[in-house]
Every structure is written in C-alpha cells, then in structure tokens.
C-alpha cells in the first residue's frame, strides 16, 4: 500500500530451498508512496525518497533520524559505501542526489548528511545513476554521461541511451559500471573507458543487479543470468512479468513483479565448480573458487588445480604465450611443461608424466610458435634457478597433475632446461646455440647435447660444448673428423684455438692463421709434449 513500510523476516528451511516468511513490523506513518529505498546495514539506517525529499530512518525501529532539507524537490538518489577494513567496521557512506538539473553530493557523519561540495549542473534531469569509484555514471532521457567527482565536476558525454524507455546503469564495484543500450550492456571504467566486450541480452533489460561473478537482468518475460568475463549465458529463469530486482547481500537476490516476490537461490559454489570444469570454463570456475571462504581448507589447493587446468587448456587451444605465463606464475615443474612438447624429454621420463587430457597435435608452424613461447618461459626459469643454485633449499615446484613426481634438484632442473633450450634453438634460431654453449654456467647434458649437435651437423658448436665442459681431447677429435662438415672453424680465416697438454690442462691459446695445419690432424697440432 502507498506509504506503508513492511519488515519481513525470511528464514530458510533446513535441507531445502523453501523459506518461511514472517511479517515482523509495519510502519504506516508515510503519507505518500515511497519512491526509492536504500538499506545501509553498516550504519543500520534506511535512506528513502519520499514526497521528493530524502529521509533517513532507523533500520530497526523505523524512527526518523533526519531529513535532508536541501534536497527538497529531488527525484533520484544513489548511495555508495566504501568499506576500508576487512570486517567492514570502517566504512564511508556517500550519496548523490538529483534535484532537477543539478547533482548534490553528501557524506554521512554523526547521524547527519553533510555537503561534500557545491551543487553542479548537468545537461538534463537524471533518470538513473550509479557510482563508479570517484565518478558517477548518469543516464538522461537521451544520453549517458560520466561525471568526475574531482571538485570540478567535469562531464564526459558517453553515448545515446537507445530505444529503451529508461536508461539503465548498475555499479559493478572495483571501479566499473554496467551501462545499458537497447539489448547490449557495456562495462566502463571510472574514466569512461570501455573495459570489456558488450553483453548481448535476448531482450532489452528492465533492471539489472550485479552478484559477482554474475550480472542478473530482468527482461520482460524472464530473468537472464550472464557473466562478463568470460561472456556466457549461464541461465534463463521464466517468471510472470518481473519488473524489479535487488540484492540483499552475498547470494541473496530478490525479484519482484507488481504482485509477487521471488528469491533466487544460487547453487553452492562447490557444485557450480564441479559443473564448470568438465565444460572447460576455467576462468569462471576460478572466480568462484576465489569467492570461497578463506577457512575452507582446500580453497587454495583447488585454485591451484584449476589454474593448472586453465594453463593446460590454453596450450591445447594453441595460446602458447598465455599458457606459459600462467605456468610461470604457478611455479609448475618445468619438466611437466616441457613434456607438453614432442621429442624434448627422454621417452622413459616423459611416460611418467600425466596430463588432464590428450596432448594436441601441432603442425610445423604451430610447433615453431610453441617453441618460441617455451624459450621465453625456460629463459625466465633458468635465470631464477641460477640465482638460487647455491641455496640449500630444494627446488619448490608443483606438479601439473597432482601425484606426478617433480624434480627437487636445482642442478638437475638446470641441466634439463639448458638441454631443452639447445634443442629449441636448433628448431627456431641456430644463431643462439653457440652463445648458449659459451655460457660459463651452461648445464647442458653432455651426451644428449653431443648426440643432437652431431645429428644436426653442428660441429663448431660441438667443439664449443667440449671446450666448455673441459673435454679438449674430444674437441680436437671433432675438428679432425668434422673437417669437411664444419659450419665454422679451421681455415684461412683463423680463429681461437685451445691448446692442451697430455693431462688436459689449459696450456696456451694461439690466435691467427692456422692454414699450415691443413694437411695434418688437428689433434696432433694441438698436442704439446
């Protein structure tokens, strides 16, 4: 009834989605219809628009606390609570009030609303408003504007409202606001910049509410539930002429028509995640997992598991760079990442690795792109491991699939990483092979590297490997046996030659033209008695 305020207590019946609704209190002292209501639980107050003015009542007793006399003639208001502490004890309430073609800003203190700054003019009478950090998005009859609350009230025109009867704006928190244009909803930052792709509804929304990670829209014949990132239609609920929607807190959403009130009851987060994982909706599953209570013992383990599934799925989608970035953040065992690629790990070891699904088949072009992403990943991992090489703590990597063995030895990991980098360079950029082998701390596995360099006919690089590993006698033999197939080395151009004694110790370095040795065995030339 007009002017009647009713307070209900809603109690959920154990083990079901049925609710017991009890009328606890009614207040009939309002003389005219209530135009707008806002509950502020942090201050236990009820802010209302009544007879074109702003009133504040006690939430428990309904007794009037104050009236904002300056706001006489107001047609719309929007409240914003900034919570500064985890428990919500420290909160600041701000309110923007539309009075004809002006906006008034207030803050709540000592049971009163106080002016923030002088009123500022706007192009038309506001029809809808929503806070977005230090901005307010305002919908007028024909256009949307973004107004910066920086003391100057700078105004930015956004775009037309479209064919809908009323403009529609909804705060999303975290510095974002959802703005409706016909059957589209766009997401803007507090600077008015488009942040996400538009949501496309099946009809023009009448009202919207944000219940993270979902946006719930009231359409003429049903309620539609979607997500912004990723863009998904989650559910459609058919109701009889719904018109209004409001949130009563986390997981509490009410929808109303002129005659009925419904409550939307979400499926548990755990059940939602179980449904999402087989459908490979990992981004949405992650958002839900992060919303679980911190006291949940398996929360962080589940988040880590979903992130690994997400990274693996990115690889299967051929999004190699994105996949490697996620694996880097997770600290996944590098050998498990290398195992995603064919022919980079020893066959016996690769058989021990487990993956969530069969690995994708990559074309030659895709494999080259994948190798380049792996090189960036391994280069970062290598730099990190080299810094920690002399720490006593073992490597703290995690498996891609729970239960798969990981490598604890940093030296062993470096050996696998460097040997894999060598293979990748041979596939993508041969010019990088020699610089890798010349590194003072190169950990390439000698026998494996020897095999792949010989197979690739990279004899000068093979000599560098031998020299850096102290195998100078082998280096001399390599010069002799590979003389006709060197990619660089002995000849009229000269070079740097390592000269060793019988005991293999470094004795001298000769530089210059060694063409005089062309008829002799290089190993004989390098032997000093």
Image (spheres, rainbow, N blue to C red):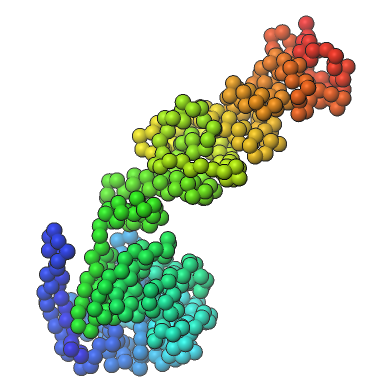
User: Looking at the figure, which quarter contains the N terminus?
Assistant: bottom left
**Residue depicted at x 48% and y 66%:** 196
Q: Does the image show residue 221?
A: yes
Q: Does the image show residue 329?
A: no
Residue 200: name its quadrant: bottom left
Q: Residue furthest top?
A: 529
Q: Is residue 90 above or below residue 337?
A: below
Side of 74 where 435 appears, left or right: right
Q: Is residue 417 above or below residue 160?
A: above
**Residue depicted at x 43% and y 80%:** 182
**Residue depicted at x 14% and y 61%:** 16
**Residue depicted at x 71% and y 24%:** 459
All told, the count of numbered labels is: 0
Residue 165 horizontal/vertical position (percent): 39, 87
Q: Is residue 85 above or below residue 148?
A: above
Side of 187 where 112 appears, left or right: left
Residue 387 horizontal/vertical position (percent): 55, 35
Q: Is residue 264 above or below residue 523?
A: below
Residue 204: name its quadrant: bottom left
Residue 352 horizontal/vertical position (percent): 42, 30
Residue 46 horizontal/vertical position (percent): 25, 79
């Amino acid at each position: 009834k007009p002017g009647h305020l009713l307070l209900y207590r809603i109690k959920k019946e154990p083990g079901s989605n049925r609710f017991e609704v009890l009328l606890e209190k009614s207040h009939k002292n309002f003389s005219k219809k209530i135009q707008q209501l806002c509950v502020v639980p942090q201050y236990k107050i009820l802010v209302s628009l009544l007879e074109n003015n702003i009133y504040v009542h006690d939430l428990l007793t309904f007794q009037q606390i104050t009236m904002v006399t300056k706001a006489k003639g107001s047609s719309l208001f929007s409240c914003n609570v900034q919570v500064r502490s985890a428990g919500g004890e420290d909160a600041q309430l701000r309110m923007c009030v539309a009075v004809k073609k002006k906006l008034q800003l207030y803050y709540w203190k000592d049971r009163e609303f106080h002016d923030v700054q002088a009123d500022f003019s706007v192009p038309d009478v506001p029809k809808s408003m929503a806070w977005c950090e230090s901005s307010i998005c305002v919908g007028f009859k024909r256009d949307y504007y973004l107004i910066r609350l920086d003391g100057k009230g700078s105004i930015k025109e956004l775009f037309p409202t479209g064919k809908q009867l009323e403009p529609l704006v909804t705060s999303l928190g975290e510095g974002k606001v959802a703005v409706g244009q016909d059957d589209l909803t766009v997401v803007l930052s507090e600077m008015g910049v488009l942040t996400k792709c538009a949501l496309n509804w099946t009809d023009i929304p009448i009202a919207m509410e944000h219940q993270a990670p979902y946006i719930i829209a009231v359409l003429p014949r049903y309620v539609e539930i979607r997500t912004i990132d990723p863009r998904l239609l989650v559910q459609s609920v058919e109701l009889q002429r719904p018109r209004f929607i409001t949130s009563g807190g986390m997981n509490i959403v009410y929808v109303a028509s002129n005659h009925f009130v419904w409550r939307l009851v979400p499926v548990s987060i755990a059940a939602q995640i179980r449904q999402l994982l087989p459908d490979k909706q990992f981004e949405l599953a992650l958002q839900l997992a992060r919303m679980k209570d911190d006291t949940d013992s398996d929360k962080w383990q589940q988040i880590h598991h979903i992130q690994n599934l997400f990274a693996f799925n990115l690889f299967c989608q051929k999004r190699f760079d994105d996949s490697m970035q996620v694996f880097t953040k997770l600290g996944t065992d590098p050998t498990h990442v290398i195992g995603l690629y064919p022919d980079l790990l020893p066959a016996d070891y690769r058989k021990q690795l487990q993956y969530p699904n069969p690995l994708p088949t990559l074309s030659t072009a895709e494999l080259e792109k994948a190798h380049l992403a792996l090189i960036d990943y391994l280069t970062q991992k290598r730099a990190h491991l080299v810094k920690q090489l002399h720490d006593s703590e073992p490597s703290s990597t995690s498996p891609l699939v729970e239960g798969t063995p990981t490598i604890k030895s940093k030296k062993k990991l470096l050996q696998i990483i460097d040997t894999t980098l060598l293979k990748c360079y041979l596939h993508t950029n041969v010019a990088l092979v020699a610089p890798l082998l010349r590194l003072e701390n190169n950990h390439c596995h000698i026998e494996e590297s020897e095999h792949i360099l010989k197979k690739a006919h990279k004899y000068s690089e093979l000599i560098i490997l031998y020299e850096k590993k102290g195998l100078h006698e082998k280096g001399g033999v390599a010069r002799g046996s590979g003389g006709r197939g060197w990619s660089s080395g002995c000849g009229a151009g000269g070079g740097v030659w390592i000269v060793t004694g019988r005991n293999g110790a470094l004795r001298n370095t000769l530089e210059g033209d060694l063409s005089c040795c062309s008829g002799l065995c290089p190993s004989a030339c390098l032997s000093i008695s």
